[in-house]
Structures are given as C-alpha cells and as structure tokens.
Amino acid sequence: MERVGLAITGCGAASPTQSVSNDELSDFVETSDEWIASRTGIRSRRLAMPGDSLASLGAAAALQALEMAGLDAEDVDLILLATSTPDDLFGTAGVIQASIGAKQAIAFDLTAACSGFVFGLVTAAQYIRTGTFKNIVLIGGDILSRWVNWDDRRTCVLFGDGAGAVVIQAHTVDGLLGFQLRSDGSQNACLNLKIIEDSQEMSEDVVVIKGGFSPITMNGQEVYKFAVRKVPEIIEKSLFQASLTASDVDWLLLHQANQRILDAVATRLKIAPEKVVSNLATYGNTSAASIPIALNEAVRDGRIQPGHILALAGFGAGLTWSPDRPPKSSPTFNFAIGVVTMKDPRQAIVQNFAKSIADEVCDRWCGDRSDKSPLFLSPNPIKYSLNLFLKSLD
Ligand code: ACO
C-alpha cells in the first residue's frame, strides 16, 4: 500500500447559544466568580439547552470545516466523532453523517474522554497513511452539562458544551510530525461517569441491571498534580520523536481544563505564555471539544500561520495513563494522554485563499465556475495554494 502523509485542511466549531457566567452560576450553586476564576481561569461557559444535541453541534462544526477545506461532504470517506456523551449509546457519528449528506462516509464514535480529539487525530492518521481513506472529518464534541451533578460545586462549575471539527486529507507532505499516546486501565477512581447498578429482577432466577449513569465524580487535586507532572514529560517525548525541542513550538494547545495547568505546563517546558492558546475563560472545559474549538479560533483569528508548529496534548478520564509503575501508596488515576505535533494547520485557509483567487480568475476569464476545480485542485493543491499565499505576502 502506498504510504502518504496528511494535512489538516479545514476546521470549524459550534457552541450552544446559552452562555452562563460565573455570577449567574452562583445564583443556583454555592460558589463565586472569584473562586472559579482564580482557581481555573473560567469566567463563563456555553451550556446546551433542551433541543440542542451533540449531533447538531457536531454537524455544524463539520460543515464549517468542510467549507474551509473546499471539500464536498459526498467526498468524505470517514466521520470520526470523539465523545463521551453521545446522544445515543449506539453512536452519534452516523446521525452527523446523514445530516451533512456525507453519503459515502462510514461513521463511528471513539471514546477517550478529554484525550478523544488527539486519539482521534492519530487514528485518522493511520487510515490516511495506509492509503485506506483520503478525506476524513474528525469531530470532538461533548455535552457534559447533562452528566454533572448541579449540586456538586467541585465539578459542575468546570464544564461547558460544544463541538469542534477538522478535515484531515491525504497529502504528499506529512503534517503530523510525531505523537505519543498513553493508556493504562489498571487504575480507575479519580474521574468517572459510571453506570449505576440498578438491579431489575425479571424472575426468581433472572436479574439484570437497568441502564443509567451516575454524574461525574472527580478528585480534582490528583488530576491537577497528574496533569502538571505528566503532560510536559510526554510533550517532550513527542517533540523528541519529531526531532524538535520546545523552543521550536509556535503554539502550545492543550486540553482546556484549567488555566493553572496550561501555565504550569508552559513553564515546565519553558514556552512563553504568549505561545499558549487558551479560551477557557469563555468556554470552560468542553472535554473532547476543547482542542478543536481552540484550534479553530486561533486559525480563524490569524494567530496560527502557515509553517507554524503546534504541540497538542489531551489528558483526561476514560483510560488510565501511568508510564511508571506507581508506588503502592499512590492515589489511583484514570487518565489518557495524547500528544501530537503538527505543521501548517493553516494550509486550509491558504487553500481557500487560492480558491478565492481561482473563483475570481474563473469569473473574469472563464465565465464558467466549474472550470476552476481541475485547474486549481490538481496535482498538489495545498502546496500550490501555499506557494500562492506566500507569494501574495511578498
Ligand atoms: N466554589 C467555591 N468553593 C469551592 C468550589 C466552588 N466551585 N469547589 C470547591 N470549593 C471549595 C472546597 O469545598 C474546598 O473547601 P474546604 O477546604 O473548606 O473543604 C476548597 O474550595 C478547596 O477545594 P479543592 O478541591 O482543594 O480546590 P482546588 O484548589 O484543588 O481546585 C479544581 C479544584 C479547580 C477542580 C482543581 O483541582 C483542578 O482544576 N483540577 C484539575 C481538573 C482537571 O484538569 N480535569 C481534567 C480532566 S477532566 C475532563 O476533562 C473530563
């Protein structure tokens, strides 16, 4: 099989319209803006309303990403939805597939909690590198507000809802420079959204469990210590694999869990604060959606430029991570970590820029817009577009 590389060619994001500030939250939870903002950096979050669904948020994000990539939904081969909160336990990716009209795509959900987007990116990369698929839509989305205990101020103030998406396409130059993933299922108590064991007696001899989930429980301090210790370590390993150092990183884009974690990881890696992407203040922790929502913002507002190197890291519940054997007295963990470094995430914008020139040229000289595709999208559209874009900057 031919080995190919991959490029992110589009991104998008969608959030519920309902925004709830810390002050508003403190009307019904015993908390304060001062406590939440000083401990986490969060000032407000978007919360899904009745009628909102993960499928609708995911579809909106996916359509934006496809538009940026200039890719028709019918040409998508795979839709991968990273989530812990599907609308349907059988999967929500299929609903998104139907809703965006990606008729040829296969679609499935992937669960790795807050690391889901990074795990999804690496999974998508395998399909592309082996030549199995050429066009993939990866969505990270979660509606955790439906699964928190709104009487538990230790957790409910932290989370927000939303979805972010990227289009990943086969490309001659591989933009995924390196990655490291860690899981260890042997520990399982710091962060859970567990099934409730509610027995149902069918007959004298047959007892089953009725489905249902308990709200999120978290040992915040242990999660915090873990993240601050392990995230920099695994980012360094990933950078080493890519023959890079932290000084090569243009943007550090971590799972948006807590501003203090972002700051501590950046300090450990000696990465300047202005290189850290953060949108916690307005979104809170959106779990699998946090990295693609932040990526989308930074691409669209022009911070992330062609040629920039990104270090992405997810960490969170759902899988357990433990590179060393923990001492017997150590607390239990329940985490997954994934790190990727990626180059040229703005290729899509670049491509769009070239396409807009293409549109203009065709409008002026061809009179037939359908002529532009073969002219501008082959044989190597992204590289060609990138050159065009760079030239335009001269
Ligand atoms: N408002 C007011 N007071 C509060 C609140 C609140 N919302 N929550 C807790 N407190 C109180 C506690 O009751 C406690 O009071 P006490 O000392 O009288 O008992 C005090 O504040 C300190 O509580 P801690 O839990 O020790 O607070 P901490 O400084 O550890 O901050 C926090 C908690 C913000 C959760 C922090 O531990 C953290 O960010 N941990 C990491 C979480 C994380 O990164 N998760 C990522 C994975 S989760 C996921 O993404 C799905």
Image (cartoon, grey):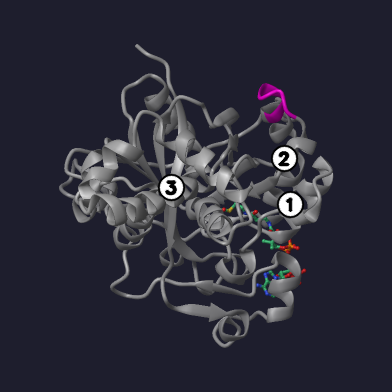
Residue type, label 2: Val
Instruction: Name the mark on residue 249.
Output: 2
* Frontmost residue, 168 versus 390: 390
* Frontmost residue, 232 versus 77: 77
Residue 370 on image: x %, y %: 21, 47
Residue 330 on image: x %, y %: 74, 38
Residue 193 belongs to the span the image colors magenta: no
Q: Earlier in the sequence, mark 1 or mark 2?
A: 2
Residue 150 placement, left or right of 235: left
Which corner quadrant of the image does residue 155 belong to?
A: bottom right
Residue type, label 3: Ala
Q: Which residue is mark 3?
A: 354
Cβ atoms under marks 2 and 3 closer than 8 Å: no
Q: Which residues are magenta?
A: 239-244
Residue type, label 1: Lys
Residue 181 on image: x %, y %: 57, 30
Label 1: few (<14), some (14–19) or many (≥20) C-alpha neighbours in 10 Å? some
**3D distance between C-alphas at marks 1 and 3:** 28 Å
Q: Secondary structure at mark 3?
A: helix
**3D distance between C-alphas at marks 1 and 2:** 8 Å
Q: Earlier in the sequence, mark 1 or mark 3?
A: 1
Cβ atoms under marks 1 and 2 closer than 8 Å: yes
Residue 76 visible (yes or no): no
Q: Earlier in the sequence, mark 2 or mark 3?
A: 2
Quadrant location, ligand no. 1: bottom right
Cβ atoms under marks 1 and 3 closer than 8 Å: no
Q: Which residue is mark 1?
A: 275
As displayed, is residue 121 above or below residue 18?
above
